[in-house]
Every structure is written in C-alpha cells, then in structure tokens.
Amino acid sequence: MDQIEHKFIDIRGLKLHVAEIGNGPSVVVFLHGFPEIWYSWRHQMIDVANAGFRAIAPDFRGYGLSQQPPEPEKASRNDFLEDILAIIDFFSIPKVFIVGKDFGAILAYSFAVLHPEKVAGMVTLGVPYMPSLSALSFSDIPEGFYVLRWQKPGRAEADFGRFHVKTVVRNIYILFSGSELPIAAEDQEIMDLVDPSSPLPTWFTEEDLAVYASLYEKSGFRTPLQVPYRTFHEVLNLPDVRVQVPTLLIMGEKDYALTFSGMEDYIKSGKVKDYVPDLEITFLPEGTHFVQEQFPDQVNPLMQTFLRKHASQLNSLMFVED
C-alpha cells in the first residue's frame, strides 16, 4: 500500500484527492461506489500497475479526503461526470480505461455515452447498464428498502447520527455483503437490521474498517446520501441510449442486486447487450456486492486480461493513425 501515491488536484473549484500508482502508457481510472472510497480499489490498483498500467483512483467530491461542494444537498450526478472529465483532462490523458463499481459503474456508463472518444474500454462491477435509472422501479419493494429510506432527506442522517461513523460503515458493509435486499420493518431503521454482535465479512479486516471510518469521519455522509441516492431521477440528456465501447461486466452470483425484479434475467438473457453491444459478462459463483474486495484473486486476472487485450488494440490503432 505504501507505493500508492496521494495528491490533491484542483478540479472545478474543489480540491479532490487522487490515489495513483504506476507509470505505464495506458491509464485506468477507478470509480468507487458507496460506502466505498479510493481504498476499495487497493488490490486492483497495485495489480494493474504491476502489469504495466497507470492507475488513478479519485475520491469523488464530498467523499473521503476530497473537498465538500459548497452545498452538498445540491450535488448532482452531472457534477460527478464533469469532475471525471476534468480529472482526465488535468492529467492530459487522451483516452482511458474506466473501472466502476456500483454507482461508480453507473457513472462510468453515462460517461462512456457522453464521451466515447475518451474511453478505450470499461470494466464494471455490481450493476449492469440501464439506459435510465428512473426506469428502475421500486414499486414492488416495501417502503423499508434502504434506497427508499435514504432518498428521504433527514431519514438516513437521523439513523446514522445515532452511531459512530465506524459503526455506520461496518453495518453497511455487513448488510451489503448479504444476498438479500436490506429492508427494514415499519418501526425499524436500516442500521437496526445489523446485530451488534454480527462479525465483519471474512475478507474485510478491522484494519480495512479503520481506514474507511477515518475517511468518512473526514467527509461525513452529506454528499454520499445526495449522490447517488437522491439523484436517481436526475435527467442527463444522453445523446444515445447505447454504450459503444468494449465493456466487461463482473457480477457476483450472491450479489443482492440480482434480487431486483427482472435484474438477473436482464443480464443472463443477454437483453443488456441491446444497450451494450460489445459486452462480456462474467459471474463469480460466491461473489457478493463487494466482489473486487472479496475475491481480488478472481477479479484481478479477469480485469487484467480485458485491459491487456484492448490496450493492445488501442496501441495498434494509435500506431496506424500516427
């Protein structure tokens, strides 16, 4: 971990934290989800750097060590997309690979549609591409579903506020590592779903938890609750509904996301390829929602094979163009 360098860069009026390792000609930008942070990519960043790539993992605005926007409650997904573009331009990188997990994957898909000339390929984890998030229906899911609860201003803040930040992160990791949707009863809050005696997932150490806790103690949860949870219905006005760059989707068979109505069939039937024509799909039998932290020994080779293949094609194309 010591070989990963850290810096702060000025991006659209904010100082954003970036973790970086490697100096290869091909660049991989890692986009985290929630309750993750740059640290969630620790295994993958070192692996791709050892394979000859340059890895860059920002903390999104308002997350971890990055500066809060002036009004976190007004942050938008479009803000995050513009930040990604500005980060790539800051480093003067003409074309990158993007790796995204959970809502980082959602941002990756949108970015590839908006800026296909900037994206050589993508690896996404935990979430397939859907042309519109507003089309994701929660109408058949009880009111106690965590997304519905966290969409309500003040509800999650009051729930989280009863506990130390470390306990909040711990509880979310335990909940999201399960294979069922986290749903609270009417007289329950989401944090109450976790018994205090429940152990951490075996692949997530107390040291890992301490790192996450220290980063969220710095940032708090104001921006993370706004984006993604309170921006689901934001309209991005994408120029196309299809992702036209090569993409590898990695899903855990025990990821609770597969229990959304129609989700598993949407992926396994190949319907998702209507919107991502150049798509490879891999399922890891024991994988959960945090598959890149749970099984880096399986995820890393899949990612590296994909990156090597398309980096070779990209370099060949650039050589022809030169």
Image (cartoon, rainbow, N blue to C red):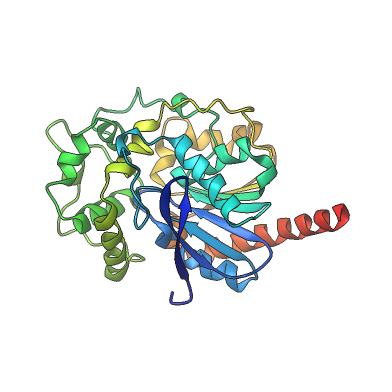
Residue 24 seen in render? yes
Q: List x then y, in percent, for residue 112.
A: 61, 40
> At x 19% / y 34%, what residue is drawn?
154
> At x 64% / y 39%, what residue is drawn?
115
Name the image quarter holding the C terminus: bottom right
Name the image quarter holding the N terminus: bottom left
Q: Is residue 248 left or right of residue 46?
A: right
Q: Is residue 299 left or right of residue 309?
A: left
Q: How many marks?
A: 0
> At x 14% / y 37%, what residue is drawn?
188
Q: Nearer the viewer, residue 129 or 288?
A: 129
Q: Nearer the viewer, residue 265 or 67?
A: 67
Q: Where 299 falls versus 3 (above or below)?
A: above
Q: Where 136 falls versus 107 (above or below)?
A: above
Q: Is residue 242 left or right of residue 103?
A: right
Q: List x then y, in percent, for residue 82.
A: 52, 41
Residue 59 seen in render? no
Q: Where 173 falls versus 159 (above or below)?
A: below
Q: Where 313 falls versus 50 (above or below)?
A: above
Q: Residue furthest top?
A: 139
Q: Nearer the viewer, residue 110 or 253?
A: 110
Q: List x then y, in percent, for residue 286.
A: 44, 56
> At x 15% / y 30%, what residue is drawn?
186
Q: Quadrant of residue 189?
A: top left
